[in-house]
Image (cartoon, grey):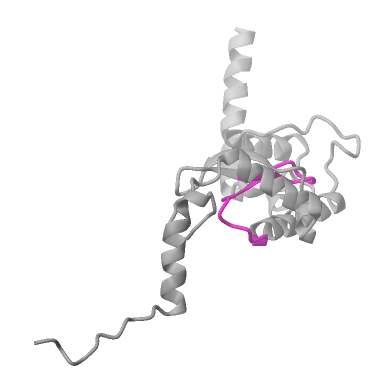
């Protein structure tokens, strides 16, 4: 017995019809949601970064040289983009998936502060004073003992804060106590005395 009810033909909604169309349009060469694209190569990412750099979208890029491919890899194993700093030359690497300039801004701020500080502080070599090379930490106590003995300076001169400003930073950091300087002077005196006895005999 034929059914008295007629089956209604289901009309697809607009979303369903567009989904059906996207599945059927794969042969058109158009990019569809269901088709897959190969991720861009590192060189293509570099070209995009250089285009962004050239367009000057952010003020941050003014402090950097033209971006280049970094030797560092991101968490996906792809090369990062390196932005060499104009002030210090250090390349700041950024993943290709990250378009934020916060890392670049942070480095520029630190670099500018460092360069301002170095301009205000002059080294002895810049003032024409030479011969203040690196000092071995092991020689600090000996240098202090020799200074006190040669110049007949009191040991208390070593703890005077105004004197510390004149000393090499390595000496300031490893300055011995007055008792240690006294012991070192005694050891130097004994060694020189033994040397003189050997020469005279």
Is there any visible trace of residue 162 in the rendered image?
Answer: no
The percent position of residue 106, horizontal first and vertical second, equals 68, 60
Which residue reaches farthest front? 1
Quarter of the image for residue 183 reads top right
Of residues 122 and 173, the one drawn nearer to the viewer in this rendering? 122
In the image, residue 162 sits, relative to residue 135, either above or below, namely: below
Of residues 24 and 142, the one drawn nearer to the viewer in this rendering? 24
Q: Is residue 101 magenta?
A: yes
The magenta segment: 81-102
Quarter of the image for residue 201 reads top right
The percent position of residue 130, horizontal first and vertical second, equals 84, 31
Q: Residue at x 77, y 43 (%)?
A: 65
In the image, residue 175 sits, relative to residue 109, either above or below, namely: above
Q: Is residue 99 magenta?
A: yes
Which residue reaches farthest bottom? 4
Of residues 133 and 30, the one drawn nearer to the viewer in this rendering? 30
Q: Residue at x 79, y 49 (%)?
A: 54
Is there any visible trace of residue 142 in the rendered image?
Answer: yes
Q: Residue at x 74, y 41 (%)?
A: 89
């Amino acid at each position: 017995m034929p059914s008295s009810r007629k089956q209604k033909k289901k009309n697809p909604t607009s979303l369903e019809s567009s989904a059906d169309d996207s599945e059927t349009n794969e042969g058109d060469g158009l990019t569809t949601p269901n088709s897959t694209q190969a991720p861009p190569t590192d060189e293509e990412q570099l070209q995009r970064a250089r285009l962004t750099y050239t367009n000057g979208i952010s003020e941050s890029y003014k402090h950097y040289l033209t971006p280049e491919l970094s030797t560092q890899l991101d968490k996906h194993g792809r090369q990062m983009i390196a932005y060499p700093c104009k002030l210090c030359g250090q390349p700041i690497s950024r993943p290709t998936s990250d378009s934020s300039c916060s890392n670049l801004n942070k480095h520029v701020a630190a670099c500018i502060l460092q360069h301002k500080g170095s301009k205000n502080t002059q080294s002895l070599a810049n003032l024409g004073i030479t011969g203040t090379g690196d000092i071995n930490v092991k020689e600090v106590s000996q240098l202090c003992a020799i200074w006190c003995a040669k110049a007949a300076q009191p040991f208390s001169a070593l703890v005077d804060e105004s004197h510390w400003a004149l000393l090499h930073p390595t000496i300031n950091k490893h300055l011995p106590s007055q008792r240690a300087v006294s012991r070192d002077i005694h050891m130097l005196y004994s060694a020189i005395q033994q040397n003189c006895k050997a020469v005279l005999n």
